[in-house]
Amino acid sequence: MERIKLMIIRHFYVSWWVYLLVGSCFIVGLFFGFLGMSSLEQNQTSSLRQLFEEALMDFEENFNFSVSARQALVKNILNLGKIFLMGLTIIGLPLVLIIIFTRGFVLGFTIEFLLQEKAWRGGVMALLAVLPPNLLSLPAYLLGAVIAINFSLYLIRGHGQRSIKMSQCFMEYLLAMFCLGILMLGSALIEGYFSPIFIKLFQ
């Protein structure tokens, strides 16, 4: 137990700047998501509102919980898979940050749209339908990005400066991503079975 604690402390000590970089990319994406929604012209907002209302009508008539959970899982695993693959390449570091920025942008845009279009009901919908799955998926994305960037930096350092064998480092990388995949599974189950209940209540 003490060894694990020391490993975690050492990890944060060495990687604090990576966490800062990844977190900053997410926050900037979140800010631009809010800003992007607020800066839309009236005709763009009207078109988006119409699409949203049509999606809600289709949601009311044809919604399937298992299909929704499966789609959410595929989306989450694909994104985590992209982060994993980018970590295996030396040039993948900026692409990982772009994925995190995009995630923040989409979340910020969605929350701002709900607040503008549904007022207090949009706020409640964002809190009860959008936030719960993100409580699992966001840490998975952010941790996955940090781990992928660290692995990419490990490759950049070269053979002469490596204190850990390549095979051991790769297996640790693979195991960490697998554990994050479990978080993504939990997030998909919440998004597919839990969030729709509140969307129906507050739409």
Image (spheres, rainbow, N blue to C red):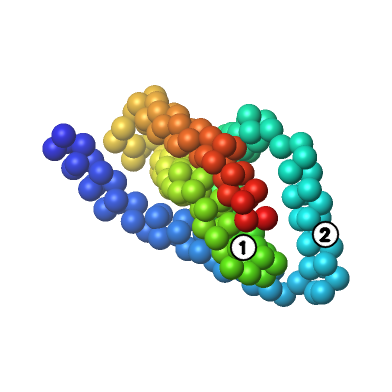
The numbered dot on residue 71 is none
Q: Nearer the viewer, residue 117 or 79?
A: 117
Tag 1 near tag 2, CB within 8 Å? no
Secondary structure of the residue carrying tag 1 is: helix
State which tag comes first along the sequence, 1 or 2.
2
Alpha carbon distance from label 1 to label 2: 16 Å
Q: Amino acid at mark 1?
A: Gly
Q: Quadrant of the C terminus?
A: bottom right
Q: Quadrant of the N terminus?
A: top left
Residue 109 place in picture, x, y as percent: 64, 62
From the viewer's perspective, tell me whether residue 29 is left or right of residue 154.
Answer: right
Badge 2: few (under 14), some or many (20 or more) residues near its Cα, within 10 Å?
Answer: few
Residue 70 place in picture, x, y as percent: 63, 31
Q: Quadrant of residue 67?
A: top right
Q: Nearer the viewer, residue 11 or 65?
A: 65
Query: In the image, what residue occupies the spot 82% across and 74% down?
Result: 42
Residue 175 place in picture, x, y as percent: 40, 28
Mark count = 2
Query: In the image, what residue occupies the spot 61% across and 63% down?
Result: 121
Residue 149 visible, this orientation? no
User: Can you identify the residue that label 1 sits on?
Assistant: 122
Specify the farthest residue to the front.
Answer: 201
From the viewer's perspective, tell me whether residue 86 is left or right of residue 16.
Answer: right
Query: In the image, what residue occupies the spot 58% across and 57% down?
Result: 125
Q: Amino acid at mark 2?
A: Gln
Badge 1: few (under 14), some or many (20 or more) residues near its Cα, within 10 Å?
Answer: many
Q: Is residue 27 above or below residue 91?
A: below
User: Can you identify the residue that label 2 sits on?
Assistant: 50
Secondary structure of the residue carrying tag 2 is: helix
Specify the farthest residue to the left.
Answer: 2
Residue 15 place in picture, x, y as percent: 34, 51
